[in-house]
Image (cartoon, helix red, strand yellow):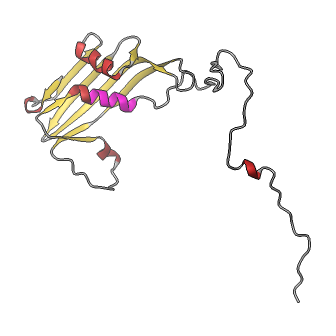
Amino acid sequence: MKLKLHELQKPVTLSLSESDGWFCAVFEGLKLKTEGPLSLHLVLTKEKEDIFFEGHLQAKLILNCSRCAEDAPYVFNEFFYPVFTHGQDPSIKDAELSKDELDITYFKEDELDMGDVIREQIELMLPLQPLCSSACQGICPQCGQNLNIKSCACKKDDVYSPFQVLKDFRVIKDTKKKRRK
């Protein structure tokens, strides 16, 4: 869905659900499994050369647990507020950006692809390492057994550490005291 910016004169409200083919295509492009209803509520406002988004996304997702690779249900109930401004990106090398500046995106054309905007916001809000539960034990690195289901009899190897050579290190104290004359 392309948004023609010159046509945006007053605030626009969009409510999308899984019945909208375009919205489902955005999720398919992310290769996310959904469970249950999807809904997106957007309010777009234009002030001078800036486009302000107020978005609320609700979805039930099935992610892969980063420890055991089982399904990890994730309830997505997120708000997002990106700002788009017309013009050149004043890219300054090694400049520290404020929190407000991180949400500003620059664009050149008179069109804004809403699919890209929504896709980017979803990717930013997904957990980096989804877990099926906080107590997930993962899988055994030797036999591949899911340790949440059953423990295995594999010998646990000591993890190599460069400090292992120091475990037998002993400090010998000098018991003789030097006298000053």
User: How many numbered marks does the figure carry?
Assistant: 0
94 shown above or below 23: below
Give the quadrant of residue 175. Answer: bottom right
Image quadrant containing the N terminus: top left
Q: Nearer the viewer, residue 124 or 157?
A: 157
Residue at image position (11%, 32%) is 5
The answer to which image quadrant residue 178 occupies is bottom right
Q: Residue furthest bottom?
A: 181
* Position of 21 relative to 98 (above/below): above
Q: Is residue 36 left or right of residue 165?
A: left
Q: Residue furthest right?
A: 176
Measuring from the top left, give residue 159's x and y in whole percent: 69, 38
Q: Residue at x 62, y 21 (%)?
A: 144
Image height check: is 41 above or below 91?
A: above
Nearest the viewer among 120 and 178 is 178
Location of the C terminus by quadrant is bottom right
Residue 145 relative to residue 176: left or right: left
Magenta part of the chain: 117-125
* Residue for point 17% across, 31% down: 112
Q: Position of residue 3 (x, y in %)?
A: 15, 27
User: In the rendered structure, does residue 50 fall within the stretch colored magenta?
Assistant: no
Name the foreground residue: 161 vs 3.
161
Please name the predominant secondary structure of the magenta segment in the image. helix
Instruction: Say which residue appears at 39% left-offset and 14% top-offset.
Output: 34
Where is 91 relative to 12, above or below? below
Q: Is residue 119 magenta?
A: yes
